Amino acid sequence: MIALAGRRILVTRAREDAERWAERLSGLGARPVVLPCIVSEPIVDEQTAQALRGAAADASWLVVTSARGAEAVARLLGGPLPAHVRVAAVGPATARAASELLGRVDLVAHAATSGALGGELAALERAAPASRRRVLVAGAAGGREDAETALAAAGIPARRIDVYRTTPAPPLRERRQLAREGIDDVLLASPSAVQGLVNTAVLPDRARVITIGPTTTAAAAAAGLHVAAEARQPNLEGMLEAMT
């Protein structure tokens, strides 16, 4: 892995997610700079609320992959989660939000990724009768479906309901000049983050752009950014490995 000591690394995720990445980078000796390039908003229409309530009434598990997802679920339910529904959370921050807003957490992914959460939940559900394998995933519109993919690989279908959406940070009249801040590396984890970055900041020519996968790489190239490396695994650890 590349030596990170002293390197100023720009984290462009939504603020809640960026803080977790910043902690990991700080632990490796880097100097993270958080610039949220994504804005999240809950989906609050009555059709979504009714769909979520109906699905929750029939589900054995609710999967939440972010704190924003837990917040949106609580808002849409408008009351307590049915007592029979167990809650699976993607990591500690999501688990804290779910515990506070939904009343409980029964499974937290050890690897703190939605794919890992899906795999761990699938391992638990294999022992359950097929008629009781009813998983509800609360996600982001247009977001990754790693949890559902991992469950499907184990023969466990999941119903997904999008409960919030993410959009790029809006354009600024005067964009932030990152050359003044000595940014060495930039982490981009979604096409929305690419657009939000272009809307709000100007990168120094020497900064290395690291992407989380092909879709983000394509968006970065379309935005005129030179991508130095692309992660083989769609998570922070994959991006760190790509920085070598």
Image (tube, rainbow, N blue to C red):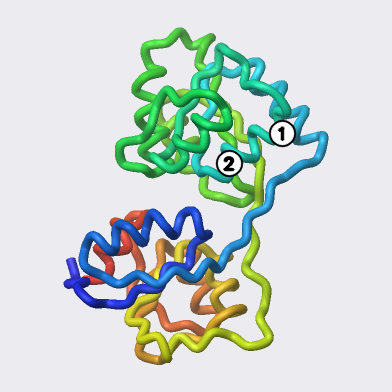
Dot 1 or dot 2: first in sequence order is 2
Outermost residue toward the right? 46
Q: Which of 4 and 152 lies nearest the eye of the viewer?
A: 4
Please identify the quadrant where the N terminus is shown.
bottom left
Left or right, 150 with respect to 159, comes to left
Q: Give yes or no for contact between labels 1 and 2 (Cβ–Cβ under 8 Å).
A: no
The residue shown at (59%, 85%) is 175
Q: Which residue is mark 2?
A: 69
Disc 1 and disc 2: Cα gap in Å? 10 Å
Residue 219 lies in quadrant: bottom right
Residue 92 lies in quadrant: top left
In this rendering, is residue 80 above or below 229?
above
Outermost residue toward the front? 100
Q: Position of residue 155 (x, y in %)?
A: 45, 24
Under mark 2, the amino acid is Gly
Q: Which residue is mark 1?
A: 76
Numbered label attached to residue 147: none
Q: Position of residue 161 (x, y in %)?
A: 65, 36
The residue shown at (32%, 81%) is 184
Under mark 1, the amino acid is Leu
Please identify the quadrant where the C terminus is shown.
bottom left
Crowdedness of circle 1 by 10 Å Cα count: few (<14), some, many (20+)? many
Q: Position of residue 117 (x, y in %)?
A: 39, 35
Q: Which of 33 and 213 lies nearest the eye of the viewer?
A: 33
